Image (cartoon, helix red, strand yellow):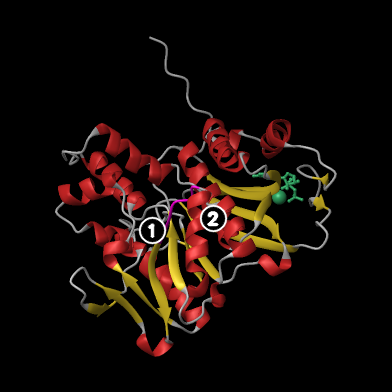
Amino acid sequence: MAAPARPKAISAIREFDLIRKLQQRYSTHSPWVHRSIGDDAAVIAPAKHRRQLLTTDLLAERVHFDLTTATFADIGFRAGVANLSDIAAMGGTPEYLLVSLAIPHSGTRRQVSELYRGMMAACRSHKVRLIGGDTSASASGWFINLTLVGSAIPRHVLLRSGARIGDELYVTGTLGDSLAGLKLLQASQRGTDKRPLTPRHRRFLIRRHLRPTARILEGRWLSAKWATSAIDISDGLSGDLRHICEESRVGAEIYLPALPISPACRFYAKSIKQDPVTLALAGGEDYELLFTVPARRRARFERATAAHRLQITRIGRITPARSGLCMIMQNGQRRLLPFTSFEHFRPTM
Ligand code: ADP
Ligand code: MG
């Protein structure tokens, strides 16, 4: 029997080989990109009368992702969405991507190309162009750094600091799905996934974890007309709401019964005998937008979201800073919002 072909280690991938592949596969021309992959630096013409938005994200193996529960394409996709989502939360349009990789000796060509496939799939519908990056060997595990450049009309840039007392608090989509999906993947990894969840609900939650959606269109629409502040939910609702409150120097109250939770997430919570609200409050990486709208515009705003068929839920309002961050329970009781964040659920931290 012939010995199985040994996967080609990254040390065998000459760096310029990789760069040439990336150039062939992804380089595009446009009047705004004078040079992309292939020179010492990319050369772009900044769009006139716009603000540039720059965001970067570093992902370390076993800290931010785990090769036992995600493929390289999934990891690339999620890395893309994490950056796109930051631009969405600023009300911007994503434009250019730079990718730096540190590749362990066990890394293969196929893994690198799957990673880019996932990243570019997340970016494709937004016409983001890959314009450069850097490549290194790693002595221990993968490191994946994305830098995304975008832009926005100056007066539309959405900050965390714009929330005002009395503003209504809203969120897009549903909360907690990604955490439920991650827990399902971890349970099946441990062989303890024997929960009575339908295959459809299971697939939905896992997809929400592995293939989240960055709310780019929503962010732009909100920033142009409605929102006073916004943040994307990457650490969990309670943690990210805290960021808005700190930056805006206000307090907030959220109505727990109003939190948007998908049927799949409710079933999952029931199956592990947990309150779905706990998942919705703590679950990070949903990449939904949390934002504020002035109270006097509430009726018009809600009519407009219905007309645009946007899934948006009012979950609370902004209060004076001295009231702190509160939650209002089903029975009307008011309590301080516990400080839980997605970090507490990470298996490796
Ligand atoms: P330098 O030595 O000047 O850093 P490199 O040889 O690292 O140049 O890079 C050559 C070109 O390839 C540059 O345009 C760079 O942006 C691009 N590049 C290098 N690594 C990557 C990568 N992992 N992804 C995308 N582009 C890359
Ligand atoms: Mg380099």
Q: Amino acid at mark 2?
A: Ser
Q: Which residue is mark 2?
A: 85
The magenta span reads 309-313
Residue 6 drawn at (x, y percent) = 47, 25
Q: Main secondary structure of the magenta part?
A: loop
Residue 183 pos. (x, y %):
28, 48
- The structure residue drawn at horizontal position 21% and vertical position 74%, both measured from the top left corner, is 332
Mark 1 falls on what kind of element? loop
Q: In the rendered image of this protein, does residue 333 appear above or below residue 52?
A: below
For mark 2, give the secondary structure.
helix
Q: Position of residue 121 (x, y in %)?
A: 57, 37
User: Can I make out residue 67 in this image?
Assistant: no
Q: Amino acid at mark 1?
A: Gly
Name, please, the residue furthest toward the top. 1
Can you say which quadrant of the picture contains the N terminus?
Answer: top left
**Which residue lies at the image location 57% right of the left edge and 65% below the top edge?**
226
Left-right relation of 232 to 21: left
Seen from the viewer's position, the closer of residues 173 and 52 is 173
Residue drawn at the location 54% of the way across and 72% of the way down: 160
Q: Which residue is mark 1?
A: 284
Report x, y in % for residue 15.
67, 39
Horizontal relation, residue 217 to residue 332: left or right? right
In the image: residue 28, left or right of residue 336: right
Category of crowding for the residue at label 2, using alpha-carbon neighbours closer than 10 angstroms: few (below 14), some (14–19), many (at least 20): many
Q: Does residue 132 appear in this view?
A: yes
Which residue is depicted at the point 29% across and 34% down? Answer: 200
